[in-house]
Image: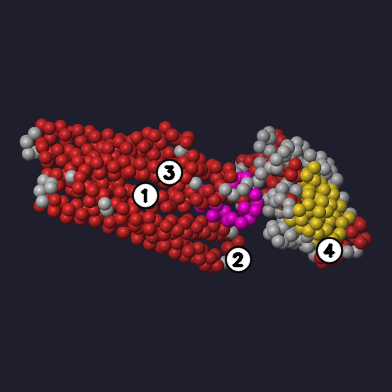
Amino acid sequence: MLRRFLEYYRPHKKLFALDMAASLTVAFIGVVYPMVTRALLNDLIPNRKFRLIVIYGVGVLVLYFIKMLLNYFIQYQGHMMGVRMQAQMRSDLFRHLEKLPFTFYDNNETGKIMSRMTNDLADVSELAHHGPENIITSSVSVVISFVYLSTINVWLSLIIFACVPLLIFVSMKLRARMHAAFAKSRKAIALINASIQSSIAGIRVTKAFTNAEEEQAKFQVSNGEMVEASRDQYRAMGLFHSSTTFITEVFNVVVLIAGGLFMYADYIDFADYSAFVVSINLFINPINTLIRFMEQFQSGAAGFERFVEIMDTPTEADEKGAVDAQRLEGDIRFEDVSYGYEQDQNVLKHVNFTIEKGKTYALVGPSGGGKTTICHLIPRFYDLHSGSILLDGKPIESFTRESLRRNIGIVQQDMYLFNASIRDNILYGRLDATDEEVIEAAKRANIHDYIMTLDAGSDTGVGERGVKLSGGPKQRICIARVFLKNPPILILDEATSALDNTTEILIQRALDELCKGRTTIVVAHRLSTIKNADEIAVISDGGILEQGSHEQLLELGGIYSELYSLQFREQESA
C-alpha cells in the first residue's frame, strides 16, 4: 500500500524535492538560535564583544526572514502539492467508478461513495503534504539537535536520549487503538453522508407523506453513531496525546535534575547548563511533531485504505479477444439463460427465445418476473450465470462492452436527466451531433414545440434529475436522446407508463416511428400498447409461460388472455 501511495508523488518530484529542501533548511536555521545563545553566554557577553553581539543578532534576524519566506513556500506550495495529489486520486477514483459494474452500485450507497471522494481524500491530501516533511525534517532535527547537545555535554545528552525508547513504546502501544478509532470514524462519516443524501434526494416524498419525523429519527441513528465513533476517536487521541506529552515533559524534569547534579559535581558550568536548557527544545520539538504526526498518519492512512478498497474492486472487463461490434443487425437469441442477483437465487431460469432483426418483442407479466432483468442482460449491465445471449449469431461476450452498448438504446419509465440544459441532455445521446440533428431528434420525439415555448428554449436548465420539468417533457427529452443515438436495438422498459393518455399517444407515435426497421424489446403493463408487437412473451417466476402474437395468445385463453380481459373490463368501467 505504501508503494501505491508513493506513486502519486512521481509527477511532483521537483516540487517535492524543493519542499523537502525548504523544510530541511528551516530545521537547520532552528539550530542557530541556541548556538548563538551559547556563544553569547560563554564568550561574547563575558568578554564584552558588543559589536559581535549586534552582528550575531542581525545575522539571526536575516536567517529568520529567510525562514519566513521558506515557511510561506512550504505552507503554500507544499499544500498545493497535496491538493494536486488529492485531485489525481479523485480523478483515478472517479474513472474507476465509471467502470464498476451495476452490482457495486446495488450494494453501495451514493453518500458513502461521495464521502470517500471528499472527506477521506482530504485527509490523504494532508498526509501527502505533511507526512514526508514531518518524518524527514523531524528525524534530521532530532539527529542534529542530539549532536549539538552532545557538544555541550555528552552524558547529559545520553540521559535525555535514553528516555526516547519509553516514548516510542507508549506511542506504538496506543497506535493500534487510535487506528481502529479513526477507521470507525471514517465509516460513521460515510454513513451520515449517505443518510443526508438519501433524505435530501427524497425530500418531496417526505413532504408529500408528512414523514419528516421519521426521517429525523433515521438521521438521529446515523448521527448517534457518528457521535459514538467521534467519542472513541477523541478518547484514543486524548489518551495518546496526554501520555506522550507527559513523557516529553519528563525530559525537562530530567534535564532539571540531572543538570543540577552535574553542576553540583562540576561536570558542567552555568553557561553550558543554561545553553542546554535553552537548546533542549531543539530535541523535544521535533519529537512532539512526530507524535502529532502519528494522529495525522492514522487519519490519512484510514482514508487511503478506503480509497484503495474501491480501487481494488474489479471493474467491468472485456473478454480477451473482444472486438468492436461496429453496427449490429439486431438478431437476438437467448439460449438457456439463467441469472440471479444473488448467486443462490435465480430471477431467470433457463430462458430461451429468438428475436429476428427489425421485429418487436414484447414482455408482459407480473412485477419481479424477470422482464427488466432480461433488458439488463442484453447490454451486459450484469453478466450471465449460465447460458448465452447471441447478437447476430455471436455471443455478446465477443464484443467490447462499449461497442455493444453503442448499438442499444434504452428508454425507461424513470429516465435520468442531468442538471444541465435541455440541449445538453439530448446531446448525451451522441455528443458530436450538430444543432440541426438535435432539433430533428426533438421534433421526432414531439418535444420541439414545447421547447420553443420556453423563454430560454433548448438552453433551459432542467434542474437536478429534471425536477423543473413535468413527467411528459422529461420522458420526451429522454426519447429524443435515443432518437439522436439512432441504435439498431431498442429497449423500451415501460417507457410510457408514467404519462397521461394524451402524452402517451404522442410518445407512442414517436416510438412507433423509431421502432421501424429496428429490433425492439418492449416491457409494458398496459397491454393495449403492445397489441401490434410481432411476438409477445408472458414472463413469470423467471420463465416464459406463454409466447405468440396478440391474436394467438387471446385464442390460447391462458394468462395473457386473462390479463387482457381484466384490463379491458377496467377500461370499460373507467
Camera-near label (4 vs 1) is 1
What number is the disc on residue 209? 2
Quick one: label 3 or label 2, which is nearer the N terminus?
Answer: 3
- In the figure, residue 106 lies in which quadrant? bottom right
Give the amino acid type for the residue marked by disc 3 in the picture: Ala
> Is residue 551 on the magenta stretch?
no
Q: Residue at the location (81% across, 65% down)?
A: 570
Label 4 Cα crowd, 10 Å radius (few <14 / some 14-19 / many 20+) = some
Judging by the rendered image, the residue that carries numbered circle 3 is 128
Q: Calculate the distance from the C-alpha at mark 3 to the C-alpha at mark 2.
A: 47 Å
Q: Tell me: 184 left or right of 64.
A: right
Judging by the rendered image, the residue that carries numbered circle 1 is 293
Q: Residue at the location (26% across, 37% down)?
A: 29
Judging by the rendered image, the residue that carries numbered circle 4 is 563
Q: Tell me: 128 left or right of 164.
A: right
Quick one: label 4 or label 3, which is nearer the N terminus?
Answer: 3
Q: Calculate the distance from the C-alpha at mark 2 to the C-alpha at mark 1.
A: 49 Å
